[in-house]
Amino acid sequence: MLVLGIESTAHTFGIGIVTGSGKILANERSVYKPTLGKGIIPKDAAEHHENDKEMILDKALSKADIPLEDIDIIAYSCGAGLPPCLLVGANFALDLSKKLNKPIIPVCHQIGHIEIGRLTTNAEDPVIVYLSGGNSQVIAYAEGRYRIFGETEDIPLGNALDVFARGISLPMPGGPEIEKLAKSGKYIQLPYVVKGMDLSFSGILTAALNKFKENVNKEDLSFSMQETCFAMLTEVTERALAHTGKSEILLVGGVAANKRLQEMLDRMCEERGAKFYVVPYEYSMDNGVMIAWVGALAHNSGWKQDLEDKIKPAWRTDQVEITWFK
Ligand code: ATP
Ligand code: FE2
């Protein structure tokens, strides 16, 4: 069985092709880049996806070395995401499904990030730390759902890093730039905000931007942002491990690429005798493979769903019924 997955929730248009047993045959992507100093403009991103979709499909098919007719199932990112971008992927998926007369499966983007992590690391039943531009959640599977144990109360971590980076004139995406600068920084105090299992990053962001205006240097601010935000996450993740009794941690989403964050979580796992896994870099970013793989899992577990809503811009991780776990 071959599943083609389409990703188009935000900045990335991606197509992945996987087999029913999880062999990855293609992972092609094209990323919309906003003009310098600006955030993503949904209409422009959608236009980018529209322009590149056929080219990415051709590339994916030739990488997998199969004709389009060999695809058995079309899966697409149905949400959460920006409506104009989601519509490009959904309509493309519908067209392909009609043309090929093959089933179509709507996939939740966040579940894609989780499942590609489990597939590529072989983590079985981990506490998942999902950190990206749009999400900051500590998640674990229980009774048919991926439950959210802790999350940001305001902005996601990736977003906080990007806004801070823009504020101090670094290029986008900001996370990797901050990581580089942080290597030569020293600690200055920023607000540390953990409330129960939830986190808040907006106060740290404001404090860091204010200190920049007071001439604190970029290196020290980058280092201190990282140390503070990552320590907060490590604290909440450790508590989630204790709470759930699980013995694995899986780090996914774009921010997972950060080596200092990996180091802090890894050390905590070592102290607790837990295993630590990180999604490989190429699958940490948005991609079509993760969508195809959730399509395969859903199909293999006999999952059936009518296409009630073509897109679900506000779909939440814990609203999705997980029919394939174990
Ligand atoms: P979502 O999955 O919630 O829809 P998204 O898909 O927009 O969000 P991703 O592409 O998974 O987000 O992640 C992008 C984020 O990852 C950006 O905020 C970027 O700054 C951050 N990021 C990438 N590399 C690093 C790094 N090395 N350190 C910290 N952050 C990083
Ligand atoms: Fe994402």
Image: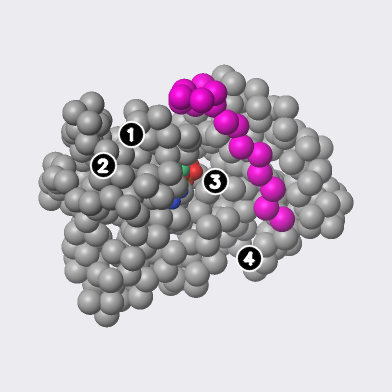
Q: Nearer the viewer, mark 4 or mark 2?
A: 2
Q: Identify the secondary structure beneath mark 4.
A: loop
Helix, strand or loop at label 3? It is loop
The span from disc 4 to disc 2 (Cα, nearest Å) is 42 Å
Image coordinates for residue 44, horizontal then vertical, percent? 59, 21
In the structure shown, which secondary structural element does the residue marked by tag 2 occupy?
Answer: helix
Characterize the local packing of mark 2: few (<14), some (14-19) or many (20 or more) Cα atoms within 10 angstroms. many
* 211 in relation to 65, above or below: above
Circles 2 and 1 in contact, beta carbons < 8 Å: yes
Residue behind mark 3? 286
Identify residue for label 2. 221
Residue 47 left/right relative to 275? right
Residues in magenta?
Answer: 26-42
Which amino acid type is shown beneath numbered disc 1?
Answer: Phe
Q: 84 left or right of 25? A: left
For the image shown, how many numbered marks are present on the structure? 4
Q: Nearer the viewer, mark 2 or mark 1?
A: 2
The kind of residue on which mark 2 rests is Leu
